[in-house]
Amino acid sequence: MQTPTPAIAPVQFVPALHAGVPAAAGQRCSTCSRRALCLPAGYAEPELQAMDALMFARRKVKAGERLYRQGENFHFVYALHSGTFKSVAAVHGGREQVTGFHLAGDVLGLDALAEGRHASEASALEDSEVCAIPYRQLAELSAGSANVRNAVSHRLGAQIVGEQRALLLLASMNAEERVASFLLDISARMQARGYSAREFHLRMSRAEIGSYLGLSLETVSRVLSAFQSQGLVAVDKKNVRILQMEGLARSVERELH
Amino acid sequence: MQTPTPAIAPVQFVPALHAGVPAAAGQRCSTCSRRALCLPAGYAEPELQAMDALMFARRKVKAGERLYRQGENFHFVYALHSGTFKSVAAVHGGREQVTGFHLAGDVLGLDALAEGRHASEASALEDSEVCAIPYRQLAELSAGSANVRNAVSHRLGAQIVGEQRALLLLASMNAEERVASFLLDISARMQARGYSAREFHLRMSRAEIGSYLGLSLETVSRVLSAFQSQGLVAVDKKNVRILQMEGLARSVERELH
DNA sequence: CGTTTCCTTGACTGCCATCAAAAGTGGTGG
DNA sequence: CCACCACTTTTGATGGCAGTCAAGGAAACG
């Protein structure tokens, strides 16, 4: 059997500053209030100091602005300090597909690892702040520290597992199960960030939820109305209050009739 | 805002041998015919020697046997030397969902990176051989070598991108587009391994294809029959011959009416 | 050779997309 | 402050795609 040339694209690191957008340089992880949620969770003092030494920039990103675009060269991973983002992949026919939503502490941009180019774009759903961490420097740091290696690996693994969960959702759930699953997911992530698990504000539109869940925006709206009339949730526009957490959970798991 | 305790589970490495199954120890990447396809693609001499020094085991896995199970502790990543595997995640209600198919050169088991436990199970679709590489040793190797780091990162990134592609498929394609997309994917991967892109043997059942594509097995069968009657493919049981590659590609992209 | 599993094809049903319209919301500028 | 416009959301009516149920046939397995 002939072995063709390896399919591994060399990762290009261009040591240029990211285009546009003023940035406050020199952020310190060691004094950051979001540290426990973020990439440096579990770092010891030496690694924290090393992260500090990177002196990476914190950028403000306004609602609707993009952090990176599909096909763009890979320079930075972005730690989401505050705000909300969506990831969007453009499909062949110009249509867009939302592949994920991101909250504070999430790390964006890892989908560029394979090809050295971003496979999706990330845009802000509200005014947000991100720490732009040069990936090459992070990789170098990981050579010297098992903690850094583990943290990066953990993020990558979490993204893989998260996408697998989304696959399960899309492949095997009906509309009600998908929407219930979505609400519970957001709820758990809000709680993990210290917010209420029972009441939160959705930053994304029905159309974006629908794209993410593989449903039309009308179906999302209808299911939310149905949940409301069943007394499971109270929905007022983008504000959601969960009234019966277990009822929602049952909506997800009731596929074994 | 209160920051809760970090959600990072410590990865447990138990230095025990993998249970059961006789194994031929001491494989050498440097003399392996699959090297160019596999994890060590792009390694230089020093890294190859280091991989050789791991002296990891090659295991034979018979059709139907499992490499690891959901929830099992993470010890090894598996480089698929020959054969075919499927990854399966069990959903809450006992139902199963195929999350991927794997061919020679693919690396299995990376979904355990996040939690230290496998998030899915891998079972062989035919008699196969895998190289069981102790992850802890691979991680240590990656501390010293940028090539090893890049190779591992590249695999992780490829898995992320691959799952994103599957998300797009499930969220936005109809049955014909999904099946066409599946056939083209298998075709491209066979070609990348030096086999014919136009004629191959599917190792998986219609039910497994359906689970992977989010379709019923009957629908998979019907779409294959339809493609056959359109002269796009010739299907005989599990043997597939692609007659009009462009026709299939058009089936995927014709969603912009 | 019998048994089991897999595949194909048909008939029917139902879930959800699509089309459509009305009501609500937010932003802008006169 | 209010009028105006664009956008989002909700709700209804309809139709189509694919799931489900069912049965016959083919292949694989022991």
Image (cartoon, coloured by chain):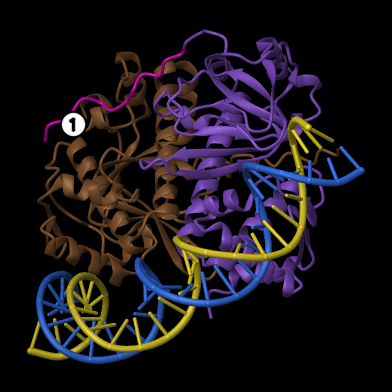
Chain colours: A purple, B brown, C yellow, D blue
Q: Position of residue A130 (x, y in %)?
A: 68, 25
Determine which residue is flagged by label 1.
B33
> What residue sits 79% from the left and 66% below the top?
A243
From the viewer's perspective, tell me whether residue B87 is left or right of residue D30.
right
Q: Is residue B256 visible?
A: yes
Chain ID for label 1?
B
Q: Is residue B113 visible in the rendered structure shown here?
A: no
Q: Position of residue B125 (x, y in %)?
A: 27, 57
Asked if the stretch drawn in magenta spans residue A7, the answer is yes
Residue stretch rendered in magenta on the structure:
A1-13
Kindly indicate the quadrant of the structure image that contains residue B66.
bottom left
Residue sitting nearer the eye, B209 or B218: B218
Q: Amino acid at mark 1?
A: Ser
Magenta span dominant secondary structure: loop
Quadrant in the picture for residue B155:
top left
Camera-nearest residue between B3 and B47: B3
Residue displayed at 72% across by 75% down: A230
Give the number of marks: 1
Q: Is residue B153 left or right of residue A147?
A: left
Disc 1 is placed on an element classified as loop
Q: Is residue B30 left or right of residue B257?
A: left
The one of C28 and B72 positioned closer to us in this rendering: C28
Quadrant hosting residue A102: top right
Residue A28 is covered by the magenta coloring: no
